Image (cartoon, rainbow, N blue to C red):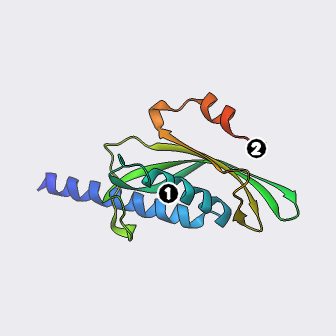
Amino acid sequence: MAALLLLLLVSAGVLLSSTEAQEAYNKLPDNYRKGVDLALQQLNSHAGVKHHFLFFKSLLKSDIESGFDVSYIYHSFYLKATKCPKGTVDSTQCKFRNDRPLIDCSVCYKTFAGEIEKDPKPYIHCVHKPALTEVCWIASCPFPRH
């Protein structure tokens, strides 16, 4: 009985975590959500990815407004694997997997009138967390940061 109660508590905590992460994604300003969506789109394009991923949390955000409705966005964040298969449309029931490393993503891109510009090409870099080094994302972003 104690094992069942422990399993129920752990399951509730995992569901709560994925629900909180989805709320965190929904609370992101639109210009940052678009970058997360770009990273998820790139991640899902890889054949080796078998699980559905969700936004987990932001690490660093920077928004430089240069005038004339142009902004440069930098966002560093974690994505986390769920127990749902890749391609899941409704992720409300997807529970996080705790047996996979986080995916550490950094994106930077230019927006005009709230839309991501194709030129310069948006920079999207995601790696499994243990493989990320600070030099990797600092040296790679072509846009100025605060």
Please give the name of the residue rendered at 73% of the width and 41% of the height, measured from the top-left corner.
142
Q: Secondary structure at mark 2?
A: loop
Q: Is residue 127 left or right of residue 97?
A: right
> What residue is drawn where x is 43% and y is 54%?
44
Neighbour class for label 2 at 10 Å: few (<14), some, many (≥20)? some
The percent position of residue 132, horizontal first and vertical second, equals 52, 32
Where does the image place residue 20, in percent across and percent down from the top left? 46, 61
Tell me the residue at 28%/54% (across/down): 10
Vertical order, 79 against 37 (above or below): above
Q: Position of residue 36 (x, y in %)?
A: 56, 56
Label number found at residue 104 = none
Element under label 1? helix
Q: Residue at x 81, y 60 (%)?
A: 70
Which amino acid is tagged 2? Phe
The reply, left or right, for residue 109 in relation to residue 71 is: left
Q: Which mark is residue 41?
A: 1
Residue 133: image quadrant is: top right
Q: Which mark is residue 143?
A: 2
Q: Quadrant of the C terminus?
A: top right
On the image, the x and y values in percent for residue 38 come to 56, 57
Amino acid identity at mark 1:
Gln
Image vertical order of residue 20 relative to residue 89, above or below: above
